[in-house]
Image: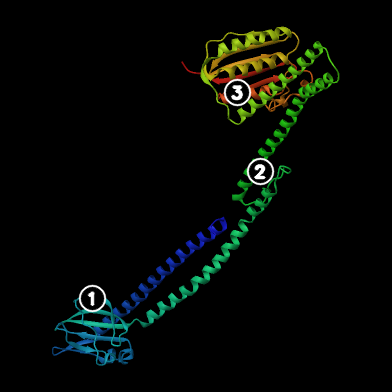
Amino acid sequence: MLNSIKSKLILWFLSVFSILFLGLGIFLYYELKDIAIGSVDSHLHSETQLIASLIEVERGEVELELKGAAIGDYALPFSGHYYQIVSSDNNIIVKSPSLIDKSLPFATEKISQALTILGPKGEDLRLMNHPFELPTGIVMIQAAESLEDIYRLLRSFRNIIIVTFPILFILSGAGIMIITGMSLKTLNIFSRKVSAITEKNLNERIEEKDVDKELKLLATSFNNMMARIEDAFIKQRQFLSDASHELRTPTSVIKSYCDVTLKKERNKNEYEEALTVIRDASERMALLIQKILDVARFESKNVLLKKEIVDIGQILSNAYKLMRPLANEKGIEILLQDGKEMNISGDRERLAELFINLLDNAIKYNKKDGRVVLSSTVKDGFAVITISDTGIGIPAEHFNKIFDRFYRIDKSRGSVSGTGLGLSIVKAIVDAHGGKIEVKSKAGEGSEFKIMLPAIRE
């Protein structure tokens, strides 16, 4: 039962309601009792004062003007209204006719006080003892009044609480059930919509308009999450499409050469030529698969970097020497501007792969007689490596996509060979080393890639 928000809210509300209602009822009951008994005490005090005013002392004897003290309820037998005057030696001087042959208990202390006692008929009485000094000595004036009316009032109040509580409990429970049901209705709508979302309708969103403030944040967060999931699915589909496209060519080459070669008997040279083509296509396929695996490992954070203290200058120099023959072959001038020694904590092989990929792109997408400049410096605790070229450049609208897997600007896809994974791997390696990468480019004027890696301070 307690596995839903609605049941928990109802239970919490009813528990708090019960505690507050019963607590308030008990407080009011005792407050009413104190007020009522206080009112009786005040009346009895006035009665003792009145009786005191009727006392006369003649020839050393205490007398009471019966005309003022033996009328009304005081004259009715066991009416619940009594008085008596007791001398200092506990002799009853006078008492009300209502006591008949009974008497009130004597005061044990000669002070003014109010007590609850049992009356002549065993009923509860409120007794007021009030000492009064006469010429003949101190007498104790006692006045008592039945508490039956007070207790009847308290019983009525208690019965009202007992009857009212379950009614209000049920009404409040029903009310909170209706309110929580209406409030959580939106959550039920959310649940139905979420349950209906599959990979075929990832563009579905939860309506944020006219939604309660507390649930609007949930709707916004869910919609943002769905946008990210949809984007991830789109990229996944694009990845599968691009991977299939890239793998189709070498696969087709291998199959076609096998089919043609096997149609008839071939001489040794023809077999060698066919096997060479098949080997090249297989190597290209293996390289592509390896790059796909590298990107997947980096994105899943499943790559363990073999970190050590490395000199970035040495890695740049090795990359420069490795790529210079390719640049010369294409008529591209490649320059390495010497920088001071910069040590970082990183994976030597992955960092070499990073700069080789960037230099390879700078050469492939360059113009005839173009230039590639490789420079490095230290700034604000980072080793800053810049690779700039005078190539075809990158339009600004492609900046946020060039690091996506298999993404290649359409204009360059047919003219320059490549897998479209190089920059994805570059970005993954930079991120894995806690670095940053920035791109500046203008179509037709070249590009500049700036890599910032945390340097080790001297």
Q: Nearer the viewer, mark 3 or mark 2?
A: 3
Coordinates of residue 2 in the picture (x, y in percent): 53, 58
Q: Secondary structure at mark 3?
A: helix
The dot on residue 185 is: none
Coordinates of residue 371 in the picture (x, y in percent): 70, 10
Please report the residue visible at 38 percent of the width from the left and 70 percent of the height from the top.
31
Coordinates of residue 394 in the picture (x, y in percent): 72, 21
Is residue 387 depicted above or below 179 in this figure?
A: above
Please report the residue visible at 41 percent of the width from the left and 79 percent of the height from the top.
153
Direction right: furthest residue? 264
Crowding at label 2, few (<14), some or many (≥20) Cα neighbours within 10 Å?
A: some
The quadrant where residue 417 appears = top right
Q: How is the image coloured?
A: rainbow
Q: Which residue is mark 3?
A: 429
Q: Which residue is mark 1?
A: 112
Is residue 416 depicted above or below 119 in this figure?
A: above
Crowding at label 1, few (<14), some or many (≥20) Cα neighbours within 10 Å?
A: some
| Pointer 3 or 2: first along the chain | 2
Amino acid at the residue labelled 1: Ser
The quadrant where residue 267 appears = top right
Residue 389 in view here: yes
Q: CA distance from mark 3 to mark 1?
A: 95 Å
Observer-nearest of 241 and 28:
241
